[in-house]
Image: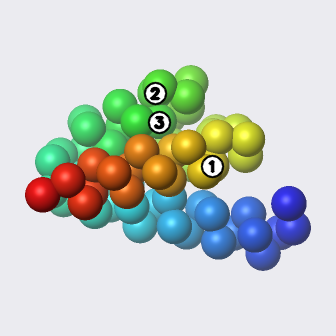
Amino acid sequence: MTKSEKRMWLTNIENAADAVAVEYGSEVAQSVFQRYDAHGTYDLSPCYYSEVFADLELIANDN
């Protein structure tokens, strides 16, 4: 994964997490990271970027 791809993933994950936090609370957004043994994007393994993003998007668009 290139640096620009990593930056894109992290930006998209952060935006999706913000959307989830606004709609459902920060605890819900945090729970997604916890499923992957992370506390946020800073310690999320790159191998989980697509899964975390998909989970957050699913929650954010569940209305």
* Residue 27 on image: x %, y %: 25, 36
Quarter of the image where the N terminus is located: bottom right
Q: Name the residue beneath numbered marker 3.
A: 33
Q: Name the residue beneath numbered marker 2.
A: 34
* Residue 25 on image: x %, y %: 18, 46
* Residue 63 on image: x %, y %: 12, 57
Q: Which mark is residue 49?
A: 1
Question: Is residue 46 shown to the viewer in this render?
Answer: yes
Q: Looking at the image, is 3 positioned above or below residue 20?
A: below
Amino acid under label 3?
Answer: Phe
What element does badge 2 sit on? helix
Are the residues at dot 2 and dot 3 in contact (C-beta closer than 8 Å)?
A: yes
Amino acid under label 2?
Answer: Gln
The one of 39 and 33 positioned closer to us in this rendering: 33
Callout in the foreground (1, 3):
1
Dot 2, crowdedness within 10 Å: few (<14), some or many (≥20)?
Answer: few
What element does badge 3 sit on? helix
